[in-house]
Amino acid sequence: MQQIVIQGKKREDRGKNAMRRLRSSGRVPGVLYGGTGQPVPVALEAHQLAPLFRTESGHNALLNVKIEGLSEELAVLKDWQRDPLHGVLLHVDLLRVAKDVRMRVRVPVHTTGDPQGVKLQGGVFEVISREVEIECLPMDIPEEFRVDVSGLMIGKQLRFSDLPLDPARMKLVSEARTVIAHVVAPKKEEEVAPEAAAAAAATPAEPEVIKKGKKEEEGEGEEGAAPAAKAEKPAKAEKPEKSEKKK
């Protein structure tokens, strides 16, 4: 496992304004804690922390932390905060570790090769898990695990139990049967059930129903069905005869 030197100073000032001035000067506020020592607020060099975020395995790098006025200590990056908008590193937590004490870490898992189940059987290759948790001494932390998936056929899986762990130096913490990757048969398009298809065919479309109804009405008229008699106009009321004028 790679080791990186991180230099810094004890941080005396607190508050948002002090943190802004610290970041503008090229340093990152943080805290060093764990082990037998007390937590120490620190200001670390930002350019020395940058390599930790360039690769997945960088998060597990061992850090030789050199703080002015304090003895050099071995630590790992435990947590960090970034500005969600600009990606600027805002704060880091460093955890003290001892060379002779085992610790739990998450290590990246990468697959190599082209599965035979894809090339020969037309299957689909899927990666399920990309990290595994192990327990080991700080000096034995691997940067990554690389596993060959060339032999995977349809229905076959690669599990954490298949990883090349050295049992004398590492202990698997994650569930051994957890699937890392597998090859599955391609999904077929769902077929319409025969009953549903028959029902759909028997049900005429709405435009046909309307058209058929019109034909039936026309047919009834052709067969001699008496059409509705037209309403006769009401006869005009006769004007009453004018009575003779009295002589």
Image (cartoon, helix red, strand yellow):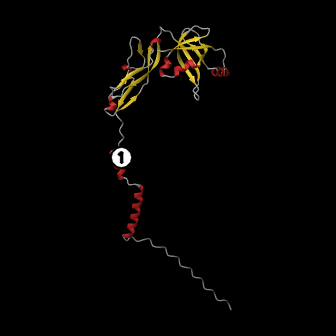
Residue 53 rendering spot, x and y as whole percentages: 52, 22
User: At numbered mark 1, what does the secondary structure look like: helix, strand or loop?
Assistant: helix
In the foreground, 83 or 53: 53
Residue 203 rendering spot, x and y as whole percentages: 37, 53
**Residue farthest to the bottom?**
247
Q: Amino acid at mark 1?
A: Ala
Label tally:
1
In the rendered view, tell whether residue 223 sits above or below residue 139.
Answer: below
> Quarter of the image holding residue 229?
bottom left
- Please give the residue where the numbered disc 1 appears in the rendered image: 196
**Residue farthest to the right?**
247
Circle 1 crowding by C-alpha within 10 Å: few under 14, some 14–19, many from 20: few
Tell me if I can see residue 197 in this picture.
Answer: yes
Q: Quadrant of the C terminus?
A: bottom right
Residue 3 rendering spot, x and y as whole percentages: 50, 14
In the foreground, 115 or 136: 115
In the rendered view, tell whether residue 56 sits above or below residue 184.
Answer: above
> Quarter of the image holding residue 72?
top right
**Residue farthest to the front?**
47
In the rendered view, tell whether residue 134 sits above or below residue 114.
Answer: above
Q: Which residue: 56% across, 14% down?
A: 6
Residue 119 rendering spot, x and y as whole percentages: 33, 32
Q: Which residue: 39% across, 69% down?
A: 221
Q: Which residue: 49% across, 17% down?
A: 60
In the foreground, 156 or 238: 156
The answer to whether residue 219 is left or right of residue 24 is left
Tell me if I can see residue 154 in this picture.
Answer: no
